[in-house]
Image (tube, rainbow, N blue to C red):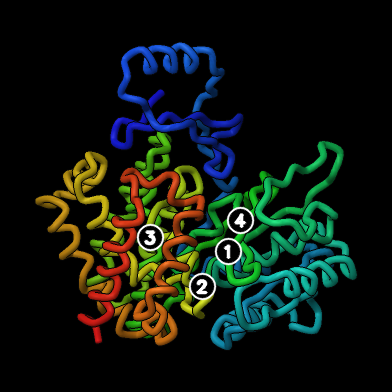
Amino acid sequence: MTARETGRFYKFSEDNRFFKFSFLEPLNPSPSALDSRLKNMAKLRLTYPTFQQPSQVTFGSGSVRTLVQASDMDDVCWFVSGSAPVRAIFERQLAKAGRSLAQVQAIFKPPGEPDQAMIDQGAAFLKEHAARRIVGLGGGSVLDWCRLSWARSAGLLDDDHARNVTVPAEMKTPELWLAPTTCATGAEAASVAVYLDQGEKQPVVCDAFLARRVVLDGQFLADLSTGELANLLADAVSHAVEAFISIVPNYLAKEAAASALGLILESYPAAPEVSRNERLLEAAYLAGLAASHCSVGVIHAFAHSVARWQVSHGHANALGLLPGIEANAETPALARLTRRLGLDGVSALVERLRPLAQTAIGHGQHDQLRSALAAADRCAELRAAMSKDVCLRTCPTTLDETALDAYLARVRAGMEAAA
């Protein structure tokens, strides 16, 4: 199997997850060497792609009430966003179900991305309360936090770096119910959770992280400002674009990616009504589903690498979105995507997305990053971090140091244009 756009061989492990495949060396143009490698490839046992998704997705404004309508709530543990609007909706739904906050086992997320200390805090909470079901209600960091906390409490997650976690067959796992309150990460669709370790984001892959139920309620987007919404959608858009053009050949996932991007392009310019918010939340779910199967690329390699300068993930995706599309402008996959969307080429896609990107860039904090990009040593540090990021391996365009420098130059230009 070859990746035609990149000229690289690749092989997948048993379940085709993007964190579990390995690359062989680039193709040698020598015919004899190529013949030899093709013979070796023929001996590999390649499994068929798989497409895994949560067992049930409940959606529509007001659907969050299904989280509190279960008859037995005594052994349910809640991981809830610290956001005041989210907490207010949660408490209101509890009251409608005849319960109060004091009657449920809930922990509220402190500020910041999940790190070792936060995961330890969540694990201690779970050890105090036996959980038949774990409910995550919040943004992607909350959904990751509850899953990583369970893995730590179950003794499956140690202090090492990124890993694949295998659950023993005899271990009983709790039901995971996840309700995203942002239209961004798509974490609710994935079996991957991410935490921050010494300024770098580390992924953890586990089959048990896949939710039993997902609830998509558009009312959580009602109070978002224009800038907040644009920053969130930048992440969803980059999931959709990068998953579709990824070299990982999971075509069911790529269909989800194309649908997600189409929904966002259609719904984002619409009036901020309930139905618009529902479509955006559903699009983020589909984009996350696609990214969890196909991985992403240079935009996310950039976003992961600038977390050390206190740039939020959504805002980092906004900064890197258009430069990432332009870096892959010559790939056949991107041309196919624009045709699917009825657009006249990559430049048309860029122009459709430019208002969203510029709105997001104008409503976010990136002063530390701006200073870093003005210093040659910091640029070299950032370029090195991007080169090591696993997401860069599935980018359809091979990006060397010169190409990464050009990417960062486009990021700087975008920051200046939106200033």
Q: Residue at x 80, y 52 (%)?
A: 156
Please, what is the three-letter code of the amino acid marked with disc 3?
Answer: Ile
- Tell me if label 2 and label 3 are in contact, CB under 8 Å: no
Which mark is first along the chain, 3 or 1? Answer: 1
Distance (Cα) linking label 1 and label 4: 7 Å
**Element under label 2?**
helix
Residue farthest along the right direction in this orientation: 128
Residue that badge 3 annotates: 299
Is the C-beta separation of discs 1 and 2 under 8 Å?
A: yes
Disc number placed over residue 12 in the picture, else none? none
- Given the image, on which type of amino acid does mark 4 rest? Pro
| Mark 4: secondary structure | strand
In the rendered image, the vertical position of residue 248 relative to residue 187, given as above or below: above
Residue 312, given in percent of the width and then of the height, sits at 48, 76
Element on which disc 1 rests: strand
Counting from the top left corner in percent of width and height, residue 93 is at 62, 77
The crowding category of the residue bearing disc 3, from other C-alpha atoms within 10 Å (few below 14, some 14 to 19, many at least 20), is many
User: What kind of element bears circle 3?
Assistant: helix
Residue at left offset 81%, top offset 67%: 123
**374 up-or-down from 279: above or below:** below
Amino acid type, mark 2: Ala
The Cα–Cα distance between marks 2 and 4, rounded to whole angstroms, is: 14 Å
Viewer-proximal residue among 20 and 257: 20
Mark earlier in primary sequence (2, 4):
4
Residue assigned mark 4: 203
Instruction: From the viewer's perspective, tell me whether residue 313 is left or right of residue 79.
Output: left
Foreground pick, 159 / 276: 159
